[in-house]
Image (spheres, rainbow, N blue to C red):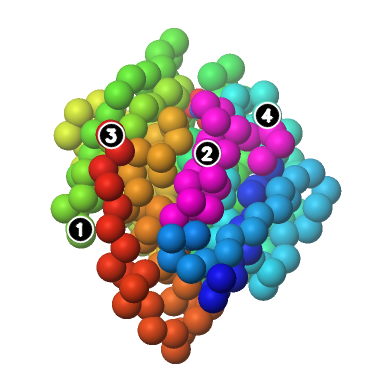
Amino acid sequence: MKYQLHLAHLYGDLLNTYGDIGNVLVLEYYAKQMDVELTSEVISLDQPFEATKFDIAFFGGGQDYEQVIVSKDIQAKKQALTDYIEDGGPMLAICGGYQLLGKYYIGANGERIEGISALDHYTKSQDNNRFIGDIVIENEETGQKYHGFENHNGVTYLGKDERPLGKVISGHGNNGKDQGEGAIYKNVYCSYFHGPILARNGELAKRILLTALKRKYPDADLTAQEELKIKPTY
Ligand code: GLN
């Protein structure tokens, strides 16, 4: 393979709701077609996140119980993760991971679960309710539609310099009110989609891989990679 990318799977042993790890497998699948060898390693409790070692990071979702454990540990990685994000490092964060990149998440029992404030959103709790079901959104920059499945108690409100991943066409999205779903900040993509998101939305996988390639190999001719055709899988 001509190119190499290394992925950090943040807390892959704790946050893996609905097979979120499938996102890593999908990235490997498209990476091969782009002449890229994608390797990955789980970075979990008590392990440092070395920002310069990674070209992509993936952060899955989980139950409140696991989120509390991760919330405590991730404070030690806060600076390194923020540096990585501010430096334009590509990241995909799903549901619980999305919530923990923000300021805080009020769990279903009312407890405040601290995030790392790398992104400016915050997440509150619904009263005895969850948003569960199929969802379709449209990314307003590309016109691409993303299909997925959401299941979350948290309702998220975006903050400074964040825009939604897409506008809700059907389903609930971030909070059921403002028609936004997910968040984009620099090269970080956040979403409530499980299922996993990239298996049904290969265009997003391609976008993340291209971003990582351009960042690591700024002088490479990536025409063939740009032209890779993605078959719709939903
Ligand atoms: N525990 C969080 C919530 O209910 C995240 C859930 C998830 O990752 N599926 O909002």
The residue beneath circle 3 is: 234
Q: Secondary structure at mark 1?
A: loop
Percent across and percent down for residue 185 are: 40, 59
- Amino acid type at circle 4 is Glu
Q: CA distance from mark 3 to mark 4?
A: 30 Å
Percent across and percent down for residue 221 are: 38, 84
Magenta stretch: residue 17 in it? yes
Mark 4 residue crowding within 10 angstroms, few (<14) / some (14–19) / many (20+): some
The image shows a total of numbered marks equal to: 4
Q: Is residue 187 above or below residue 143?
A: below
The residue beneath circle 1 is: 142
Q: CA distance from mark 2 to mark 3?
A: 15 Å
Q: Is residue 159 above or below residue 97?
A: below
Nearer-N-terminus badge (2/3): 2
Magenta stretch: residue 133 in it? no
Mark in the foreground, 3 or 4: 3
The residue beneath circle 2 is: 22
Observer-nearest of 170 and 180: 170
- Amino acid type at circle 2 is Gly
Mark in the foreground, 3 or 1: 3
- Amino acid type at circle 3 is Tyr
Nearer-N-terminus badge (1/4): 4
Question: What's drawn in magenta, residue-wise?
Answer: 12-30
Percent across and percent down for residue 200 are: 35, 38
Q: Is residue 106 above or below residue 12?
A: above
Q: CA distance from mark 1 to mark 2?
A: 24 Å
Nearer-N-terminus badge (2/4): 2
The residue beneath circle 4 is: 66
